[in-house]
Image: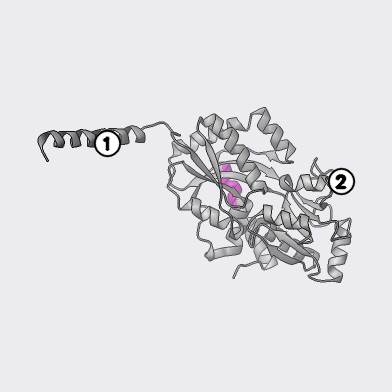
């Protein structure tokens, strides 16, 4: 290599190095952010994620792209997030399934630690879940009638969930134990797929979060028999809670929140928390959440961490009581 070529190469290397330093020092975020939804498209987690991506991206001045990675009750997507580079450019939508039910049901088989492998950023919304039946397949118009029919014919009725070990699975196993009935569980790779089969009559019933089930209930394609929440949903004022039906042990509804891989810089977590909280104050965002039958619950990272721990403790008890384990 002659001197002229050598100097040109050195200059090029220096320019690349300078660009790398400038990139490293660029204010966050300087590129597109990926928000992983650990379920198939169409479910409530997906709906909430797309809202936070749209409005949160506006506040950050950077696009947030939703990527669905469904399977194993949400655990495959969360495993992907846990193993991602902790730079703030891969985030995950955590739910009571991924950070409560899955750890209890999968135990040591779970390939991520819901506490050690993540940093909470903020919870976003809480929503009731609803147990609904296909009116063309099930004649029961109340949960009392449904329980009576189920007791008379064990495993006659099937129910779809977003997957084995998911929140929906754990909740209905819990209900079956309390009501002393036996239904046939049909797991899917996400709430959207389960809903499609419930609407088509491939399964008799479904337990799903209210946002994704509500349009079908209002359209008469599903009949709601019970909601899992502390009080009746304003969106379904005539549908009783499990507590009203004599099953207060069922507790309350689920939530959706944003987490990052462990090791993400604290200043990035703070930036995301502030941006998402500002997004959740947008009147358009609030209106859309209300229309879904959900309630906004913005939190600090520490508060969200406590909620995650509470979910883990609760579903550990549920798993033991209903004997729910994935072999």
- Indicate the position of residue 291 as horizontal and vertical percent values: 74, 37
Q: Which of the 4 image quarters holds residue 23? A: top left
In the visual, does 240 lie left or right of 123?
Answer: right
Above-or-below relation of 45 to 312 = above
Front residue of 293/189: it is 189
Residue depicted at x 81% and y 69%? 156
Front residue of 29/327: it is 29
Label 2: state its secondary structure: loop
Residue 230 visible here: no
Q: Main secondary structure of the magenta part?
A: helix
Residue 304 visible here: yes
* Distance from the alpha carbon under mark 1 to that under mark 2: 65 Å
For residue 238, which numbered disc appears in the image?
2
- Range of residues picked out in magenta: 303-309
- Indicate the position of residue 163 as horizontal and vertical percent values: 64, 60
The residue sitting at the left extreme is 2
Label 1: state its secondary structure: helix
Residue, disc 1:
17
In the visual, does 97 lie left or right of 292?
Answer: left
Residue 307 falls inside the magenta stretch:
yes
Dot 1 or dot 2, earlier in sequence: 1
Above-or-below relation of 265 to 287 = below
For residue 258, which numbered disc appears in the image?
none
Quadrant that contains the C terminus: bottom right
């Amino acid at each position: 290599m002659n001197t002229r070529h050598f100097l040109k190469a050195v200059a090029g290397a220096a320019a690349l190095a300078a660009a790398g330093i400038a990139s490293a020092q660029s204010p966050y975020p300087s590129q597109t952010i990926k928000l992983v939804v650990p379920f198939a498209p169409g479910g409530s987690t997906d709906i909430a994620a797309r809202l936070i991506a749209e409005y949160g991206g506006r506040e950050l001045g950077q696009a947030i792209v939703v990527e669905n990675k469904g399977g194993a009750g949400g655990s495959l997507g969360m495993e992907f997030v846990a193993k991602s580079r902790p730079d703030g450019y891969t985030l995950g939508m955590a739910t009571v399934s991924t950070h409560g039910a899955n750890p209890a049901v999968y135990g040591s088989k779970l390939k991520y630690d819901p506490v050690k492998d993540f940093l909470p950023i903020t919870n976003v919304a809480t929503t009731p879940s609803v147990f609904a039946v296909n009116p063309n397949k099930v004649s029961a118009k109340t949960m009392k009638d449904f329980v009576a029919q189920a007791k008379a014919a064990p495993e006659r009725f099937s129910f779809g969930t977003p997957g084995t070990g998911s929140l929906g699975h754990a909740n209905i196993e819990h209900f079956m134990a309390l009501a002393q009935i036996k239904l046939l569980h049909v797991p899917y790779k996400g709430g959207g797929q389960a809903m499609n089969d419930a609407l088509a009559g491939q399964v008799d019933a479904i337990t799903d979060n209210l946002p994704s089930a509500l349009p079908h209930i209002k359209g008469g394609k599903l009949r709601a028999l019970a909601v899992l929440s502390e009080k009746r949903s304003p969106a379904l004022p005539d549908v009783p809670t499990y507590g009203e039906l004599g099953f207060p042990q069922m507790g309350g509804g689920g939530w959706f929140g944003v987490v990052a891989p462990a090791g993400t810089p604290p200043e990035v977590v703070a930036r995301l928390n502030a941006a998402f909280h500002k997004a959740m104050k947008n009147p358009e965002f609030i209106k859309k959440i209300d229309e879904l039958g959900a309630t906004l619950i913005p939190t600090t990272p520490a508060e969200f961490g406590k909620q995650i721990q509470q979910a883990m403790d609760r579903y550990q008890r549920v798993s033991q009581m209903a004997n729910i384990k994935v072999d």
